[in-house]
Image: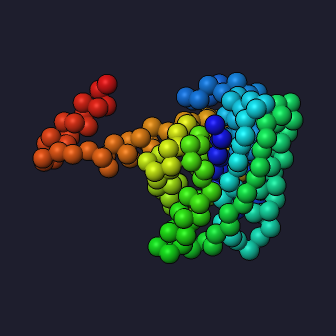
């Protein structure tokens, strides 16, 4: 089954690689520093016969950071894959830095157009503009519902900032947020009391 990876590319410079091994709820075994948390996940999961398509989501800005940062992702994953030998291809989606309805719809359509039926889907929402994870949730929902895809993992790299210092990296699997969104969208109840009760019962499972 083909793996498709979505990763938000940051606009800032001076990105710092961190070791995410054994942190938070992902239980990654990868003990080398990475800039992009999803690459620690992929280091643990990809195999030689895997076919992987990486979609790098870039937001246009007046600096050269977009190219540098997307290049760093490619170099990082290629280095990890050098000992594995999976087939990896990369595609870049550039979008304007405009939080308008038209631009959101364009990004949604561009991402959906990159998804192949029956794929396994992964996403890294660590970086990028704030609305982008919301768009990605819509993309994943569409792909699961209509393209027979399997949403495997949505991850987020959490760090603490103290001035210019970055510390305490944690690798968080937030896939449950995707399923929580699907749950609230699909719930049926006669009133708010029943809806709250249904939600409580689901969370108690």
**Residue 130 seen in the current view:** no
Question: In the displayed structure, does residue 120 sit left or right of residue 180?
Answer: right
Question: In the displayed structure, does residue 84 sit left or right of residue 141?
Answer: right
Question: In the displayed structure, does residue 80 sit left or right of residue 38?
Answer: right
Q: Quadrant of residue 38?
A: top right
Closest to the observer, 27 or 169: 27
Looking at the figure, which quarter contains the C terminus?
A: top left
Residue drawn 75% across and 63% down? 66
x then y, percent, for residue 33: 77, 36
**Residue 200 seen in the current view:** yes
Closest to the observer, 167 or 92: 92
Residue drawn 77% across and 70% down? 63
x then y, percent, for residue 7: 65, 51
Closest to the observer, 88 or 67: 88
Question: In the displayed structure, does residue 69 sit left or right of residue 111?
Answer: right
Residue drawn 60% across and 53% down? 115
Looking at the figure, which quarter contains the N terminus?
A: top right
In the displayed structure, 32 sits above or below 180; it is: above
Q: Quadrant of residue 31?
A: top right
Residue drawn 17% across and 45% down? 189
């Amino acid at each position: 089954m083909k793996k498709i990876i979505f990763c938000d590319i940051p606009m800032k410079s001076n990105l710092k690689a961190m070791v995410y091994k054994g942190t938070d709820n992902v239980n990654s075994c990868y003990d080398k520093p990475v800039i992009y948390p999803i690459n620690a996940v992929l280091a643990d999961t990809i195999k030689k016969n895997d076919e992987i398509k990486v979609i790098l989501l870039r937001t246009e800005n007046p600096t050269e950071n977009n190219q540098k940062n997307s290049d760093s992702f490619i170099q990082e994953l290629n280095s990890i894959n050098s000992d594995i030998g999976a087939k990896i291809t990369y595609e870049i989606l550039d979008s304007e830095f405009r939080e308008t309805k038209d631009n959101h719809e364009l990004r949604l359509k561009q991402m959906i157009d990159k998804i192949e039926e029956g794929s396994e889907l992964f996403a890294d929402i660590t970086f990028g503009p704030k609305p982008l994870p919301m768009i990605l949730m819509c993309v994943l929902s569409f792909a699961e519902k209509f393209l027979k895809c399997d949403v495997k993992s949505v991850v987020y790299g959490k760090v603490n900032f103290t001035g210019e210092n970055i510390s305490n990296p944690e690798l968080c699997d937030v896939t449950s947020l995707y399923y929580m969104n699907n749950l609230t969208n699909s719930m049926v109840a006669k009133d708010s009391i029943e809806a709250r009760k249904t939600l409580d019962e689901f969370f108690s499972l």
